[in-house]
Image (cartoon, helix red, strand yellow):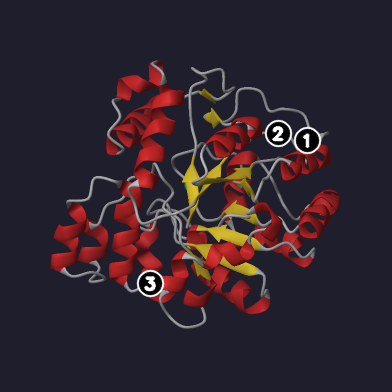
Amino acid sequence: MDAHVHLTGNGSSGSGCWLRLRGAHRWLAGFMLRQIDLPASALQGDLDRLYVERLVSWVRTSSVRKAVLLAHEEVYHEDGRLMEGFGSFHVPNAYVLSVAREHPEFLPAVSIHPARPDALAELERCVEQGAVMMKCLPNCHNIDCNLPKYRLFWERMAALGLPLLAHTGGEHTVPVVRAELADPRVVTLPLECGVTVIAAHCASRSGLTDPDYFDAFTEMLRRYPRLYGDTSAFNLPARGAHIRDCLKPGVRERLIHGSDFPVPILGLWAFLRGLISLRDYWRCSRIRNSIEKDYQLKKAMGFEPEHFTRVADLLPPKQIPSA
Ligand SMILES: [Zn+2]
């Protein structure tokens, strides 16, 4: 299972998705599309359809049986008002739920800002429709998960058995609203409310100048048995800096596999760090399908078979009858 796969679109199919790309983010979006064999011109074309078709065909022809497909919330103020003009893309929950209904290889992860006036109602609605996870980026969505007013929301998630996939560590592909919320300690209250939390990227750095929160993450692993990390985007230059530490006992048993599709998967960094052989590097460079390539690279790095199936134990059991 690949537990970190992004859905995106420009609304061309009536999905309600939007993209608002400026400067470097526009260039980056075109670069990411070319990495998944789509032309940058798809940004202005039928991106909704092209993206889903590419993703479905790559999952079907990979070793991955199920991919957790992520919605992407809009940015809100803490008082629940929409932050107009913020955020670079939006993927509505209804769209993720409908794409997952049509394609059995996907499990839907919804995205809900807990300050939204209808947050609890939306949570119930999404779980009823099959949501298996809730995804957010505290530093980009402006969610300080530790605010006492969010306690009811986390308690309801815990009661529903819905895990939280929270971005931790720096971020450079989506605009950051509050940099300090990259600290993994941002998910302390959800953990204390009994929510299973997956710290995306294990709080690793995205850029070379980001603060390094990896030690804070491993310290929390010892304290909170419901905390996990994912290895998404570990094949980017900065995010892979702690792969060797992630393979050590005490950490490796708490990690789950995620590619962060459509983020580029580059085997060069793992090779330069001495994590994979030259032979594995060449073998993986010939794989076009980035879902498969990420899996093969992590297998070559030494992540054990359980790494690629562990997330199934964290999802609400009734939501995945065929997993
Ligand atoms: Zn991601």
Which residue is identified by label 1?
A: 116
Give the residue drawn at x 43%, y 25%. Answer: 49
Q: From the top left corner, tell me how far across and down residue 278 is, in percent.
A: 14, 66
Q: From the top left corner, tell me how far across and down residue 137 is, in percent.
A: 59, 46
* Residue 236 visible, this angle: no
Residue 262 against residue 43 in the figure, above or below: below
Circle nearer the N terminus (3, 1): 1
Q: From the top left corner, tell me how far across and down residue 128 is, in percent.
A: 76, 43
Amino acid type, callout 2: Tyr
Please name which of the two marks, 3 or 1, marks the residue nearer to the observer. 3
Please name which of the two marks, 1 or 2, marks the residue nearer to the observer. 1
Query: Alpha carbon of mark 2 to alpha carbon of mark 3: how far?
Result: 37 Å
Query: Alpha carbon of mark 1 to alpha carbon of mark 2: how far?
Result: 7 Å
Q: From the top left corner, tell me how far across and down residue 119 is, in percent.
A: 79, 39
Circle nearer the N terminus (1, 2): 2
Circle nearer the N terminus (2, 3): 2
Residue 312 against residue 275 in the figure, above or below: above
- Disc 2 is placed on an element classified as loop
Query: Alpha carbon of mark 3 to alpha carbon of mark 1: how far?
Result: 39 Å
> Which numbered dot is residue 76?
2
Give the residue drawn at x 83%, y 34%. Answer: 117
- Disc 1 is placed on an element classified as loop
Which residue is identified by label 3?
A: 303
Q: In this view, does 312 lie to the left or right of 78?
A: left
Amino acid type, callout 1: Arg
